[in-house]
Amino acid sequence: RGLAMAKLNGSVPLPKDFVVSAIYQDLAGPPIEAIYAARTTDVAGSLGRPLAGGAQSVNIPLLRPYQAFEARIRRLDLRLTKNFKMGNKARLQANLDAYNALNSSAIQALNKTFGAGWKRPTQILDPRLFQVSAQLSF
């Protein structure tokens, strides 16, 4: 829990020059923060003066840092590769990749300003994506 992180990767050769590989990541979710933007009128009474430098507001953290976290980020990327021999020296490697194969929509960042939009996601994990690629070596 908390900030613990696990990353695993590996590949397995298959018959007929195929190779399958995978990368799995289990990462801590973003920390939940609550920042209150106090106006100078809100704090002048307790300070006994306005904010220094003509500042109009000051950010006040309402939660201790790293006290709470959003749900963990779990991601699986897969690749299927086929190797082709072309003559004596040339090789062709064809790949089919599936990024975020489980199609997770884990939250990566969220609004930390305390108010109506607090904890609203500002960034989520990219959706499942397939990619076809090739590499020619000679």
Image: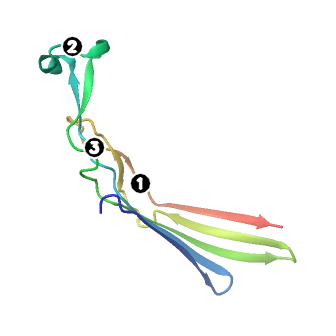
- Label 1, on which residue? 125
Q: Amino acid at mark 2?
A: Pro
Q: Residues within 10 Å of mark 2 (few under 14, many from 20)?
A: some
On-image quarter of the C terminus: bottom right
Q: Is 47 located above or below residue 26 in the figure?
A: above
Expressed as whole percent of the image width and height from the top left, the position of residue 132 reads 62, 63
Closer to viewer: mark 1 or mark 2: 2
Q: Secondary structure at mark 2?
A: loop
Up-down: is 35 above or below 10?
A: above
Q: Which residue is mark 2?
A: 50
Measuring from the top left, give residue 16's x and y in whole percent.
Answer: 68, 85
Q: Is residue 132 above or below residue 52?
A: below
Most extreme residue toward the front is 48
Residue depicted at 18% across the width and 13% down the height: 49
Label 1 and label 2: CA atoms lie apart by: 42 Å
Q: In x, y percent, where is residue 137?
A: 79, 67
Which residue lies most toward the left here?
45
